[in-house]
């Protein structure tokens, strides 16, 4: 049983690692877009697309980087209480609290899926002057939330294995 789960964890973490490393470079996309925005406002006509493109790039950056951050353990914890605990006690607490995260991510994914379907069905556009279609960023958001949900299940599997003394 743990062999199948180990393969699942290995696969999901490999996907999230690679995607997270790619998403890491999204910061340069944001910097480039915002630099162009500043230059165009100073020397040319202001571009309508720059601010919203930077916002979309930022959403993709942190949504697709979230599972990678969780995988590295870079998420926020209350270290005042958490750090002195044994690894086994940490695994017990994480096993309990990850169910809240999974419920939250499942609810978020369900709402995101509904919103994405709406954007596709009605050709939803932003209410700004540029009026880009909303479905591309909504697809990215649903993908990132789904990958975060998969990573949360991986963390649950690893914690259960740690509690049982099984090496994954």
Image: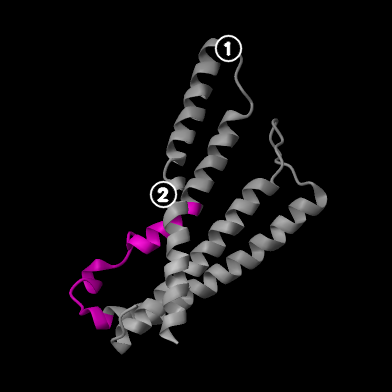
Question: Where residue 130 sits: x, y (%)?
Answer: 69, 31
67 left or right, relative to 134: left
- Classify 164 as above or below 72: below
Residue at 35% x, 79% y: name it.
159
Question: Where residue 119 sits: x, y (%)?
Answer: 74, 51
Quarter of the figure with residue 109: bottom right
3 left or right, relative to 134: left
Residue at 30% x, 80% y: name it.
167
Quick one: 95 or 3, which is closer to the camera? Answer: 3
Return the residue at label 1.
44
Residue at 41% x, 84% y: name it.
2
N-terminal label among 1 and 2:
2
84 drawn magenta: yes
Quadrant for the N terminus, please.
bottom left
Question: Where residue 150 sits: x, y (%)?
Answer: 50, 69
Return the residue at label 2.
21
Could you classify mark 1 by the number of other residues whose Cα lies within 10 Å: few (under 14), some (14-19), or many (20 or more)? few
Counting labels gives 2
Question: At numbered mark 2, what does the secondary structure look like: helix, strand or loop?
Answer: helix
Where residue 63 is drawn, which disc sits there? none
Residue at 77% x, 52% y: name it.
120
Query: Does any portion of residue 97 appear in the rendered image?
Result: no
Question: Where residue 10 sits: x, y (%)?
Answer: 42, 69
**Residue sticking out furthest to the top:** 43
Q: Which residues are magenta?
A: 64-89
- Classify 157 as above or below 1: above
């Amino acid at each position: 049983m743990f062999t199948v789960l180990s393969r699942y964890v290995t696969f999901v973490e490999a996907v999230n690692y690679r995607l997270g490393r790619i998403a890491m470079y999204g910061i340069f996309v944001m910097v480039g877009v915002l630099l162009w925005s500043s230059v165009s406002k100073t020397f040319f006509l202001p571009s309508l697309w720059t601010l919203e493109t930077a916002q979309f790039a930022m959403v993709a950056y942190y949504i697709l980087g979230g599972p990678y951050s969780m995988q590295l353990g870079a998420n926020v914890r209350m270290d005042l209480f958490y750090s002195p605990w044994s690894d086994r006690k940490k695994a017990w607490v994480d096993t309990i609290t990850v169910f809240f995260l999974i419920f939250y991510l499942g609810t978020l994914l369900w709402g995101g899926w509904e919103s994405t379907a709406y954007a596709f069905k009605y050709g939803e556009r932003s209410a700004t002057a540029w009026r880009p279609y909303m479905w591309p960023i909504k697809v990215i958001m649903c993908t990132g939330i789904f990958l975060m949900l998969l990573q949360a299940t991986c963390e649950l599997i690893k914690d259960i294995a740690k509690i049982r003394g099984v090496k994954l």
